[in-house]
Image (cartoon, coloured by chain):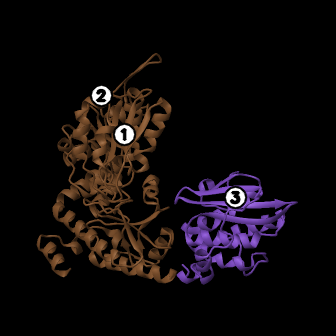
Chain colours: A brown, B purple
Amino acid sequence: MIATEKTIEEKGWDVGRIREDFPVLGQTVNGKPLVYLDNAASAQVPRIVIERGAKYLREEHSNIHRGVHYLSQRATSAYEGAREKVKRFINAREARECVFVRGVTEGVNLVMHGYGRKLVGEGDEIVVSEMEHHSNLVPWQMLCEEKGARLRVLPMNDAGELILDEFDALLNERTKLVCVGHVSNSLGTINPVKEIVARAHKQGVPVLVDGAQGAPHLKVDVQDLDCDFYAISGHKMFAPTGSGVLYGKAELLEKMNPFLGGGSMIRTVTFERSTYAAIPDKFEAGTPAIASAIGLGAAIDYLNSIDREAAHAHERELLRYATEKLSGIEGVRIIGTAREKASVLGFVIDEVHPHDVGTILDQEGIAIRAGHHCAQPVMQHFGVPATARASFAFYNTKEEVERLAAAVEKVIEVFA
Amino acid sequence: MSELSELYQQVILDHNKKPRNFQKLEGANRVSEGFNPLCGDQLTVYMLMDEGVVRDLSFVGTGCAISKAAASMMTQAVKGKTREEAQVLFDEFHRMVTGELDEEAEENHLGRLTIFAGVRDYPARVKCASLPWHTMHAALEGEETATTENLGPDLTQAAVSE
């Protein structure tokens, strides 16, 4: 173990240094140093993001896109600057392909309303995967119910890997959209989205990728993936809540209906009729979460300032180590054993409900998630009501993995 | 924050491992289902109500140790009680786990159920202990579904499906 840690440090990953960037990590919980392993729910925010948001509120706060005055221009330029950063971060062709939304849920609902309600009709089909988060499942069920369309499910195997062999057979001339997560939030599986996109495109079907767990753990290149939509939640990638992005290919966004109606999204309004603004404004009705969007820009600056490859290697090593430690404890079963995984570790303990695991770990100062992770069909697949989930970020340490393992042993002791 | 051992007392662990009245009740004339949509916990409470008395009570379902033990001990406590007595227990249990009833200072009928008092120090777990009681209460009222969904932080608003 020590040798491996050394190797990483030699490559330039100094986790102690990195932790200093995250003020929240320095506290104690229930008298013990906080071990934050709930990153897949919300990742922590580095100091430069906090300071950027505070600077906006202190010096620049104003409404955007409508003021001729100084502050409004500064706010607008910071907000649009953040959009430009997002564009480069995911390698979109143009900034106008990046629509600011509250998060993935809003992004998917935007596509459901703007694309789905316009272009999906009775008898048409939408394909989702079996491991989707409810945010990339429920909107499509709602659409199918409204339109009389059919929801089809790409299944997974017991390791939590999509069965791609069954994918082609799900596609036909009625298929209007394929919706798949880049990384499963409950299992950690990294899905072969590039391959899925290529196969869907062969049949002329566009693909929406839920990137909530992809963006924090993988290098995202939407042009390389060639996906048609890619949705991101800022709070899962070290930015404040209320920030998120829906990337869409310009030609698709242009032919879609608007989502919310109101200010900012119009060109002209009369009582007879309104015409809509060009993208992305067409989809950004009302005053957006300006401070959060600027914070997302700062989070991207932060990610660009660190060695992301070393960060991801460190996360992989934490996952490997945690998997080894927990698998070694009798009574622990890992849920999600795909070959390609991001640093998300779902597990269950024999005869102990995950909520009890969560409470006991919390007493040890360890934050994990316990529940169905907004993926009830995944729980049904594995025949469990819920799982415990530890999810790691690049600021976590091997000592924290050891504290997790010790606390899991304590749970077993309490319930023995 | 109380000690962990106050939450996971031996009695609770025992009821979790060997829940009492944990089966479908043949001949039940009230059946009620409870859900906690936040965590996916689910239970069904079966009640045989006769002339205003809960003659028999049982449950099945999945949930954490707290909810399972709460359900198990509830069936023991409520069995044989009149509708009014069951209502009183429901109210008192509620007030205890939400911190509104000091079971040591104030008169109450909770008896052994006071071992759940520690739950009030774990706000995230209050719903676990309450769900079986809400579900039983729905059966008492002749309703079919209980949920912790609409309760919000103040769980004292009695019946869930109201």
Front tag of 3 and 1: 1
Mark 2 packing: few (<14 Cα in 10 Å), some, or many (20+)? some
Label 3 sits on residue? B157
Gap in Å between the C-alphas at discs 3 and 1?
A: 42 Å
Residue in the picture at 53% in, 58% down: B40
Place of residue A401 in the rendered image (x, y in percent of width and height, measured from the top left): 32, 75
Place of residue A125 in the rendered image (x, y in percent of width and height, measured from the top left): 39, 33
Residue in the picture at 48% in, 30% down: A148
**What chain is tagged by disc 1?**
A
Mark 3 belongs to which amino acid?
Answer: Gln
Q: Nearer the viewer, residue A133 or B28?
A: B28
Callout 1: helix, strand or loop?
Answer: strand
Q: What residue occupies the far top of the structure in this picture?
A: A272
Q: Earlier in the sequence, mark 1 or mark 2?
A: 1
Q: Is residue A11 above or below residue A373?
A: below
Place of residue B64 in the rendered image (x, y in percent of width and height, measured from the top left): 55, 69
Viewport quadrant of the N terminus of chain A: bottom left
**What chain is tagged by disc 2?**
A
Q: Is residue B104 visible?
A: yes
Q: Nearer the viewer, residue A135 or A46?
A: A135
Label 1 sits on residue? A127
Callout 2: helix, strand or loop?
Answer: helix
Mark 1 packing: few (<14 Cα in 10 Å), some, or many (20+)? many
Label 2 sits on residue? A254
Residue in the picture at 38% in, 30% down: A258
Quarter of the image for residue B140 reads bottom right
